[in-house]
Amino acid sequence: MSYSVGYSQSLEILFYIDLKTKIGAETYLTIQQISNTLNIPVPSVKRLVGMLKKAELLDSKKGTKGGLALAKDASDITMYDVFEAIEGSSSLFKIYDDFNTDAFVHKNEAKRMLKSIEDVLSVSENAMINELKKKTLADFF
């Protein structure tokens, strides 16, 4: 099981936009510029940019000097913000909840075991989310 490559591509897109605008080379970057530099196909960049805009992480400007820019300062965008924009907020682990504990002689032990597994998976998911919330884009520069 893994999440889509779109998450890491989205981080790269945001890092690139932030870096280019910080050094003053550009105010807004076009999808084509991003695609060419990061070697991500234009349709993929468009799809990811759409999700990042919907999550209010990117702004766009039309016109000859238009393109894309960060909607917030890099220090205000966490890795979790990007994760949620691309992957959504569904659970990391899918729990099978149709387990028939009546088939066991020791059904109470089976129920405790299932609850323990569910607890471990929940703690693991929360740990990942908490780590992603601790890091902002600015932490990588």
Image: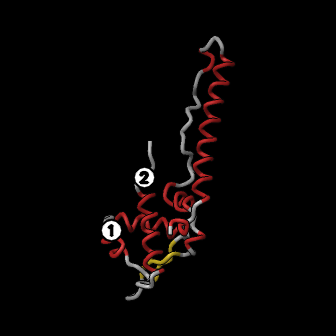
Q: Is residue 57 left or right of residue 38?
A: right
> Which residue was labeled with disc 1?
42
On-image quarter of the N terminus: top left
Q: Nearer the viewer, residue 130 or 71?
A: 130
Mark 1 is on which residue type? Val
Q: Nearer the viewer, residue 21 or 1?
A: 21
Q: Is residue 24 above or below residue 16?
A: below
Q: Is residue 26 above or below residue 32?
A: below
Q: Residues within 10 Å of mark 1 (few under 14, many from 20)?
A: some
Q: Give how far across and how far down residue 134 sits, in percent.
A: 61, 59
User: Which residue is at 40% across, 88% downward?
Assistant: 65
User: Which residue is at 40% across, 79% downward?
Assistant: 29
Give SS at disc 2: loop
Q: Is residue 99 left or right of residue 20?
A: right
Could you say which quadrant of the image residue 84 lies in? bottom right
Mark 2 is on which residue type? Ser
